[in-house]
């Protein structure tokens, strides 16, 4: 009987702690403002560019591929990625670099086999999602509570004419832990972890993305630079 009483007391304490950690927010905007403040607040508005030097792992049905990636973002709408994978090109020679460029108007992927055009307008619109979500002319927002991978989270659903995205925030820390986007190919997920401070901002150093065909991509940043000197003409041409 005494053991049962002790167990019940422990469970009550755990549940009470969870209740304390979970706060009431008037609406999605209030939650997003609190989450933004946790990671740097107004400092995010001064971020014009970011460079991430990272390791990269891609799990595919054919096996695991490893390499490095240097990701350069210029806000709003520009991304330059240079990827080197530790694999051969099918003839026994090392595979050359893969370069992907996105701008508000156009995009392309360049490999040893040549250039493949891509549609524009898919680059990041802001240095952190919360800035874009909180814009006066931003998406329609809805707030709910949920669980993700067994963890209590706040779920912010953002709806525009083009798409619906869900952003998940840990109840205890207000860190964004995941994002899902509805696409014609199905739900696409990206998870964020290993948050670290860089120049007064709190940035996720690990991003895990579920990809088409059962593939998964993991990017682990080794170095993050905020507003570094960039040769934008070399990266993106005539901006």
Image (spheres, rainbow, N blue to C red):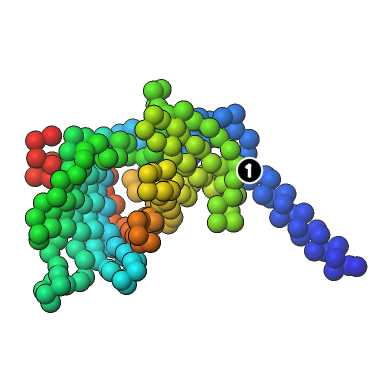
Q: Is residue 205 above or below residue 107?
A: below
* Crowd tier of the residue under label 1, counting other residues whose Cα lies within 10 Å: few below 14, some 14–19, many 20 or above: some
- Residue at image position (13%, 58%) is 111
Residue lying farthest top?
136
Picture coordinates of residue 150, whole percent (x, y): 59, 56
- Residue at image position (51%, 45%) is 169
Q: Give the position of the N terminus as an image quadrant.
A: bottom right
Which image quarter: residue 2? bottom right
- Residue at image position (9%, 59%) is 113
Q: Give the position of the C terminus as an image quadrant.
A: top left
Q: Is residue 121 above or below residue 195?
A: above
Picture coordinates of residue 173, whole percent (x, y): 54, 47
Q: Is residue 130 visible?
A: no
Query: Which residue is denoted by mark 1 in the rendering?
Result: 22
Element marked by disc 1 = loop
Q: Is residue 138 above or below residue 229?
A: above
Nearer-the-camera pick, 84 or 118 = 118
Picture coordinates of residue 172, whole percent (x, y): 58, 48
Q: Is residue 125 visible?
A: yes
Classify residue 205 as left or right of residue 2. Answer: left
Classify residue 2 as left or right of residue 150. Answer: right
């Amino acid at each position: 009987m005494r053991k049962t009483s002790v167990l019940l007391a422990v469970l009550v304490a755990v549940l009470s702690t969870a209740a304390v950690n979970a706060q009431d927010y008037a609406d999605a905007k209030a939650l997003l403002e609190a989450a933004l403040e946790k990671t740097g607040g107004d400092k995010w508005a001064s971020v014009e560019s970011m460079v991430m030097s990272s390791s990269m792992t891609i799990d595919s049905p054919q096996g695991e591929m490893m390499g490095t990636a240097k990701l350069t973002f210029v806000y709003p709408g520009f991304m330059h990625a240079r990827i080197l994978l530790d694999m051969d090109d099918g003839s026994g020679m090392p595979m050359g670099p893969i370069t992907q460029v996105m701008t508000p108007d156009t995009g392309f992927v360049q490999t040893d086999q040549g250039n493949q055009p891509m549609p524009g307008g898919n680059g990041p619109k802001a240095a952190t999602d919360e800035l874009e979500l909180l814009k006066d002319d931003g998406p329609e927002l809805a707030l709910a509570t949920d669980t993700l991978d067994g963890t209590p989270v706040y779920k912010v659903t953002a709806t525009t004419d083009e798409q619906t995205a869900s952003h998940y925030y840990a109840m205890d820390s207000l860190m964004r832990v995941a994002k899902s986007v509805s696409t014609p190919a199905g739900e696409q997920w990206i998870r964020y972890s290993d948050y670290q401070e860089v120049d007064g901002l709190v940035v996720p150093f690990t991003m895990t993305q579920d990809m088409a065909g059962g593939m998964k991509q993991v990017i682990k940043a080794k170095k993050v630079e905020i507003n570094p000197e960039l040769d934008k003409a070399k990266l993106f041409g005539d901006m």
